[in-house]
Amino acid sequence: MSWSISRLGYKCAVLKGVYVHHFRHKSINASHLNRKKYIQINNQSFFDKWSQYLYHFLISQQAENLDLKQAMNTESNNEYWILRRLNENIHFWDGDKLVSGMFK
């Protein structure tokens, strides 16, 4: 949902002062599901759906001389958190350039 909102031109924000009580992984643990497996599956589905948009976005950021390596590896950079997390499972970015063949 955040990606769709951003794509429409709106900004999403991470608010560190907001408290949400969340029972982390409660349903996954209660169901004895493999959390890492389902994160991988969900990330792959997201990447498959949005890969062309991601590709064009990353290329445009490089064209503007943005240091993507730094942006994606800086935990406090909230604008790139989804790309950082996605890359942990999909590996479309090797730190300096897009991984060849990842974008169809």
Image (cartoon, helix red, strand yellow):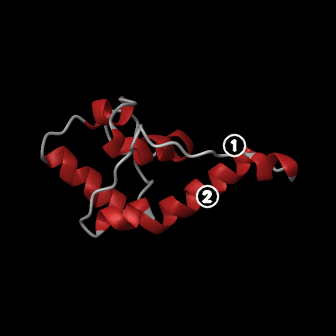
Query: Residue at 30% across / 35% down in the picture?
Result: 71
Taking 67 as reference, is 10 above or below it?
below
Which one is in front, 24 or 86?
24
Judged from the image, the secondary structure of the residue bearing numbered disc 1 is loop
Q: Give the residue type at disc 2.
A: Asn
Q: x, y percentage for residue 11?
A: 28, 57
First reached walking from the N terminus: tag 1 or tag 2: 1
Kindly tell me whether residue 34 is visible in this rendering. Answer: no
Position of 84 compared to 65: left or right? right
Q: Are marks 1 and 2 in contact (CB under 8 Å)?
A: no
Which one is in front, 33 or 11?
11
Q: Quadrant of residue 101?
A: bottom left
Judged from the image, the secondary structure of the residue bearing numbered disc 2 is helix
Query: Residue at 41% across / 59% down in the picture?
Result: 103
Numbered mark located on residue 42 in the image: 2
* Residue furthest left as drawn: 64
Mark 1, mark 2: which one is toward the viewer?
1
Count residues near mark 1 (Cα–Cα under 10 Å), then give few for <14, some for 14-19, many for 20+. Answer: few
Query: Residue at 30% across / 66% down in the picture?
Result: 7
Viewport quadrant of the C terminus: bottom left
Kindly tell me whether residue 46 is visible in this rendering. Answer: yes
- The residue pinned by badge 1 equals 24
